[in-house]
Image (cartoon, rainbow, N blue to C red):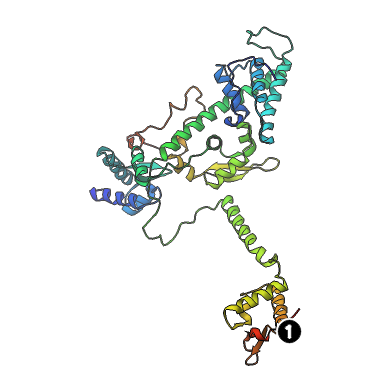
Amino acid sequence: MGPEALAIVEAMLFASDAPLEVERIQEVLEASREEALAVVSALQAQYDASGRGLAVAEVAGGYRMGTRPELAPWLLKLRRAQLKARLSRAALETLAIIAYRQPIARPEIEQLRGVGAEGVLAHLLERRLIRVVGRKETPGRPLLYGTTREFLLHFGLRDLSELPPFEAPAEGPAASAPDPTRPSDDGQPEG
Amino acid sequence: MTTLETPSAPLTVRLEEFEGPLDLLLHLARTQEIDLARLPIRRITDQYLAYLEAVEFRHLETAGEFLVLAATLIYLKSRLLLPQPEADETEALDEEAEALRRELEARLAAYARIKALGAWLGEREAWEAQVHVRDWNELPEPDSLPLEAVSLWDLAEAYRRFLARLAEEEPVREVGPEPPSLLGRMAEILGQLEHSWYVFFTALLGASPPRAEVVVTLLALLELVRLRQVRAVQREPFGEIVIERLPRAEVSDGT
C-alpha cells in the first residue's frame, strides 16, 4: 500500500457521514484487513504528529474523521452556538445499568436505582440509545433492553469493552475518565 | 416538628436533587463518612426520616419510592430491640433482619457504583460532544441499500405516527364544524354579492362541503330568492347556476 492508499482512505473518511468499518475500506482498496488497518493507523499517526485540526478515531466499530475536542470552543464561537443538551443524571445512570447488564428488564433496572424507570426508558428508546432486544421468559414477559450503535456513537466508544469494569468500586470516575490523548493512542492494538 | 439529631444536616435540601431513595441514603452515608458495608441503622434511619419530614412531595409516585425505603429502615431499627450506647456501631440484629440489612447494604454499594459509572458516561458524553463530524453525505447513494435491522421500537414508532395521522384526519370527516345558521348563511351570500353582481352557486360551496352546509346554503338561497334579494339563473340545462344580486330598489320588506 503506497502513499496513494493513504490519500484514498483520507478522502473516504472525509466524505463519510458515519464511521467506516474496516471491511468497507478493505473493499475499496482491494486490500487485506491488515493492510487496510495499517493505512488507517498511518493516517491517524500523520494527523496526530502534524498537529492538525482533525483526528481519526475508532468509534462504534468503524473509523471516523472529526474535529479535535480541544478546538470545540472555536467552533462554537464560529457558529455563535452552545454545546448540545446532555442527558440527565437519571438517563446516564439508567444507560450505565443497561450497558453492563444487558439484556435487562425494567424491574431489575428499577430495583438497582430504587426509582421508577418508565419515563427514562421511553426517552432513551426515542433517542435510539437503547432498543428492545427481546422478552424475558418470566411472568408478564417484560421487555428486555440493550444498548445500540447510537449509544457507542454518542459516547465515542469503540465497543462495550471500552467501558470501565463494573466491579471496581475502589476506583472513582476520575481515574477512568476519558484520556484527552485517546484519539492518538493507536499504538494500542485493539482486539 | 422533629428535633434533628444531626445539626449538620441541611434542612433546605430539595428532594428533587436526589435520584431516588438510594441516592439520598448514599448522600447521607457519604457526608457522614459512613462505611457502606456496615450501615449504622439507628443513625441513618433518624437522618433519613429527618430529610423526609423536611420535604414536601410534589408527586405521589416519588414519595412512594422514598417511603418504601423509609419503611425498611424503620423496620430494621425496630428490630434493634435492646437500647445500646450511641457510640456502639455494631448493632446486633437477629438473622432475618440481618439478611435484610445485608441486602440493603449490597443495593447501596451497587447503586454507588452505578452512580459513578453514570458520572463516567457523563464525562465521556461531554468530551464526545466537542467532536464535530460531517453529518451529511454528498456521495451518491449506494445502488443497493443494506437493509438495517428494524427494531420493535421502530415498528411501534411507525404505528404511533400512523395513528397520529389518522387522528388528525378523523375530525374533518366525522366531527364537522357546526353547520352555519340560516340567517348567517344568508348574510354571507349577500356579503359576497356586495363586491360583484353575481356568484356561481358552486362557488358558494367549498371543494367538499359537509352535507349540512349544502342544505343550509340551499335554504338560504331559496329564502333570499323569496325575499327578492337575489335571483337564480341557469343559462342551459345542467349548466352553472348563477346567483345575481337584485337592485336594491326592488328589495321589498321581507319581515
Amino acid at the residue labelled 1: Arg
Q: Is residue A129 above or below residue B190?
A: above
Task: Check disc 1 and report the residue beneath it.
Answer: B226
| Host chain of mark 1 | B
Residue at (50, 31) in percent of width and height: B117
Quarter of the figure that contains the C terminus of chain B: bottom right
Q: Quadrant of residue A80?
A: top left
Which of B161 and A129 lies nearest the eye of the viewer? B161
A31 relative position to A135: left or right: left
Q: Quadrant of residue B248?
A: bottom right
Residue A148 pos. (x, y %) = 51, 44
Name the secondary structure under disc 1: helix
Residue A153 pos. (x, y %) = 44, 43
Q: Is residue B247 above or below residue A88?
A: below
**Mark 1 surroundings within 10 Å by alpha-carbon count, few (fewer than 14), some (14 through 19), many (20 or more):** few
Q: Is residue A131 above or below residue B38?
A: below
B137 relative position to B47: left or right: left
